[in-house]
Image (cartoon, grey):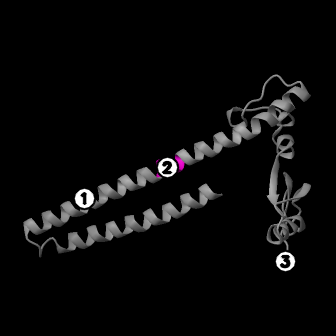
Amino acid sequence: DLLHKSFQENQKKFLDKENALKKEESDLQAQRTVLSKEEYTKKSDTLRKKVIDYQSQRRASLEKITAQRAEARQKLIEKLDPILQTYIEESDISLVIDRKNVVMGNTNLDITDIIIKKIKIKNISLNNTRTGFIKILKKMNAKIKITNQKKISGEKVGDIVVISSKLKNIN
């Protein structure tokens, strides 16, 4: 979600900047007949530099988000790896294939929901705001369990286990 939000914010920022550059280009075109050739060339060169700078910033931003996505994916894989290893050993599975690489297959062989059920977020603060949010999610039919509750440095913490579920609207 953080990456998606960052991407959306950057898209808006760059769209605004692109629109401003287009307006500046349009204004310059409108002034072409009243400006001297030297003045027009100077303003045109300045605008061209702004466009090149904009393109460079946009490319750098996209590369940064791509790198962040790759890093987040790698962290997720590192966290999922022990869970998958255990499940593979327990279930005597020979091969696990990423769903996006499968053209067709028996959907009963998809272990995504099983693995999601085994995901646990450990030592999460269980303050009133967070538990209030969890209560609302549970009213929406979210399958969330809080386990291993304890106090660390005087603060209530616990492990949150989230199971894939379909949420419903509430008032």
Label tally: 3
Q: Position of residue 5 (x, y in %)?
A: 59, 61
Give the residue type at disc 3. Asn
| Disc 1 secondary structure class | helix
- Residue 97 in percent (x, y) is at 74, 30
Instruction: Name the quadrant of the C terminus.
Output: bottom right
Q: Quadrant of the N terminus?
A: bottom right
Label disc, if present, on residue 48 of the rendered structure = 1
Indicate whether 13 appears above or below 64.
Answer: below
Q: Is residue 119 magenta?
A: no
Q: Identify residue for label 3.
A: 171
- Amino acid type indicated by mark 1: Arg
Of the residues tagged 1 and 2, which is closer to the observer? 2
Please, what is the dominant secondary structure of the magenta stretch? Answer: helix
- For residue 92, above or below residue 123: above
On the image, the x and y values in percent for residue 20 come to: 35, 70
Residue found at the far front of this picture: 153
Name the residue tied to disc 2. 64
| Residue at point 86%, 56% (across, down) | 158
